[in-house]
Image (cartoon, rainbow, N blue to C red):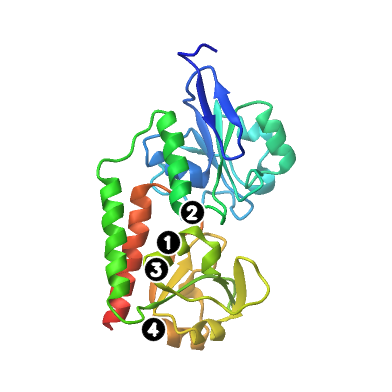
Amino acid sequence: MTEQSAWSFADDRGRLVAADRRPSRVLAYVQAGATLWDYGIHPEGIFGSGHDGAEPDRAKTGALPLDAVDYRGAGDGLDVETLLRGGPDLVVAVSYGHGQLYGLDPDTAKHLEECVPVVVIDVGQARTLDRVAERFAELALSLGGAPVPGATGDLHAARERLRAAARATPRGARVLALSPASQEQAYAARPQMWPELRVLAELGADLVSPPEGAGVNWATVAWADAAALEPGVVLTDIRSNAIPLDEITAPVWEAAGSRARIVPWNPEPLCSPQAHARFLSLVADAIEGATGD
């Protein structure tokens, strides 16, 4: 490699990933691919995790044109041959700590790295959302991408609007984040474990914490217990592995749900400024509506 033509990026495992030219055929975990797209980087392929199926989960794909980006599949269907079929010259993966590539079997990940450079971005709960976003921005810029003009300003405006909405009442609207599990139960998020939920709390939103007990990221609760938390705003997991909230028929939840404003929530958020601004604006809409009722 010559100094003029070399490309390199220090990933979140502390590894310097290098190539003799800037990569142009990127294969990415779906969250990473959708985020990079918002910076003008067009991945040639994406892959999912064990939560995903034979088709890409549209809750995670953002603005990706699914007719032009090859979805390699997810879970047990992912092997090195499948991952490499589009001839990628870079793989962008995510990790929830310890450097392990999320969504890939460790042996598959090992053999993949023997064939193609792999960059890993840590999106785990130890990171702030701002830091995760910064790392994606740094990677996108190194690959020739650029931020959308005005996106940073829109994000700042969305933050300030949410801050004002949360301040508008003495307590603000109680915000509960959950993932519907069945007709009997839900997984209630522990807000301190989710970077995007911590942002809401930092801006003044009144995040509801489920009772202490089993579960690091989630607490399993009956719908009656979720309703008893009296949320004014419910962030509901819209990924394909969650049951749609409007299919939950428990009468006690219907009674609470008639009072609560519902906000779609992807717990694997896109980390571009414009995606983050959209999410904050939806939460601000809901808080303004709930506190105005």
| Point 55% across, 29% down: residue | 90
Between 156 and 32, the residue placed more toward the observer is: 156
Q: Which residue is mark 3?
A: 263
- Taking the spot 28% from the left edge, 74% from the top edge, the residue there is 288
Query: Going from the N terminus, do you reach mark 1 or mark 3 first?
Result: 1
Spot occupied by residue 266 in the image (x, y as percentages of width and height): 47, 59
Q: Nearer the viewer, residue 152 or 292?
A: 152
Label number found at residue 199: 1
Secondary structure beneath disc 1?
helix
Q: In this rendering, would 254 be left or right of 159?
A: right
Q: Evaluate if marks 4 and 3 touch, with contact meaning CB atoms under 8 Å apart.
A: no
Question: Earlier along the polypeptide chain: callout 3 or callout 2?
Answer: 2
Give the labeled residue for mark 4: 258
Q: Which mark is residue 128?
A: 2
Report helix, strand or loop for mark 2: loop
Q: CA distance from mark 1 to mark 2?
A: 8 Å
